[in-house]
Image: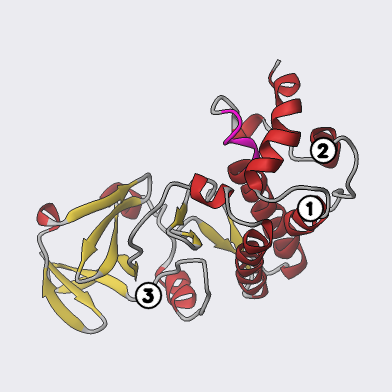
């Protein structure tokens, strides 16, 4: 098939490429040292894939840890080219997420701040995040990948509040709760201050659900890394929640 990327024409056989991942929206392939995402045909046919203009907007946003679209991809359909996907930065040398758990808590906080800074930028653009709970990649740095299921929203204040809540739930679930219990269902997890306070013996002011502030509080309480938090606090109380 013929594809147009950055105004250049390429003949690409998707079946010959290394598949990096598949999902509801489409499949991601390794191509020319980039990650090439092609939407599923049915998603395009019924309009589930996000608009071309949305991806053009996102491709112009510069972030540190959120991997956004880079170049839009068009496939030749009869006498014209149709928007079918996009390229992204290709990440390599993936490590198990538990490597992050042994890092000094100060280093983890630095990683968290970079992601939070990216969230602030997305919010300023009116981009509301959805369904990225499992879309992370760790290779010594923590990234959020494959951002197609986001929507635009004119209410910036609402977007900011929603995105702040979403990224903190991401941190709490993937870095504290999930490692302790593989049976924990994200959809059934009550991300609220009373639940979190119960995990941490009501010792911390975390009503704002601010993960980096929580880590700062914990770091001054004889806690060195995420593994310490999981063992000292979360593991102690999570069994009560799962009953």
59 or 63: nearer the eye? 63
Which image quarter: residue 1? bottom left
3 or 106: nearer the eye? 106
Q: Name which of mark 2 and mark 1 comes first in the sequence.
A: 2
Q: For residue 200, which numbered disc appears in the image?
A: 2
Mark 1, residue position: 214
Estimate the x, y position of residue 226 in percent, counting from the top left.
65, 47
Relative to 157, is 219 above or below? above
Determine contact: label 2, label 1, CB under 8 Å.
Answer: yes
Indicate left or right for 72 with 135 as reference: left
Picture residue at 49% right of the left edge, 61% below the top: 143
Indicate left or right for 229 with 19 as reference: right
Estimate the x, y position of residue 95 in percent, counting from the top left.
40, 52
Which image quarter: residue 37? bottom left
Eye-nearest disc, 1 or 3: 1
- In the structure shown, which secondary structural element does the residue marked by tag 2 occupy? loop
Q: Which residues are magenta?
A: 176-181
Q: CA distance from mark 2 to mark 3?
A: 41 Å
Mark 3, residue position: 70
- In the structure shown, which secondary structural element does the residue marked by tag 1 occupy? helix
Estimate the x, y position of residue 214 in percent, counting from the top left.
79, 52
Q: Is residue 16 visible?
A: yes
204 or 4: nearer the eye? 204
Q: Residues within 10 Å of mark 3 (few under 14, many from 20)?
A: many
Q: Name which of mark 2 and mark 3 comes first in the sequence.
A: 3
76 or 109: nearer the eye? 109
Determine contact: label 1, label 3, CB under 8 Å.
Answer: no
């Amino acid at each position: 098939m013929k594809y147009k990327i950055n105004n250049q024409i390429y003949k690409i056989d998707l079946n010959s490429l290394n598949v990096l991942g598949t999902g509801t929206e489409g499949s991601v392939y390794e191509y020319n040292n980039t990650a090439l995402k092609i939407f599923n045909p049915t998603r395009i046919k019924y309009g589930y894939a996000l608009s071309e203009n949305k991806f053009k907007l996102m491709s112009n946003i510069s972030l540190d840890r959120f991997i956004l679209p880079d170049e839009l991809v068009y496939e030749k359909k009869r006498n014209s080219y149709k928007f079918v996907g996009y390229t992204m930065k290709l990440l390599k040398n993936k490590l198990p997420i538990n490597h992050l758990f042994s890092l000094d808590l100060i280093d983890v906080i630095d990683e968290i701040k970079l992601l939070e800074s990216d969230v602030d930028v997305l919010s300023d653009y009116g981009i509301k995040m959805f369904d990225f709970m499992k879309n992370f990649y760790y290779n010594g740095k923590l990234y959020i990948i494959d951002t197609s299921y986001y929507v635009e929203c004119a209410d910036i204040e609402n977007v900011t509040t929603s995105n702040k809540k979403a990224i903190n739930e991401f941190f709490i679930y993937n870095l504290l709760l999930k490692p302790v219990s593989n049976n924990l269902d994200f959809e059934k997890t009550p991300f609220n201050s009373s639940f979190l306070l119960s995990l941490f013996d009501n010792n911390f002011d975390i009503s704002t659900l601010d993960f980096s502030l929580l880590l700062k509080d914990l770091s001054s309480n004889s806690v060195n890394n995420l593994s310490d938090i999981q063992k000292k606090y979360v593991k102690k109380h999570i069994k009560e929640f799962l009953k």
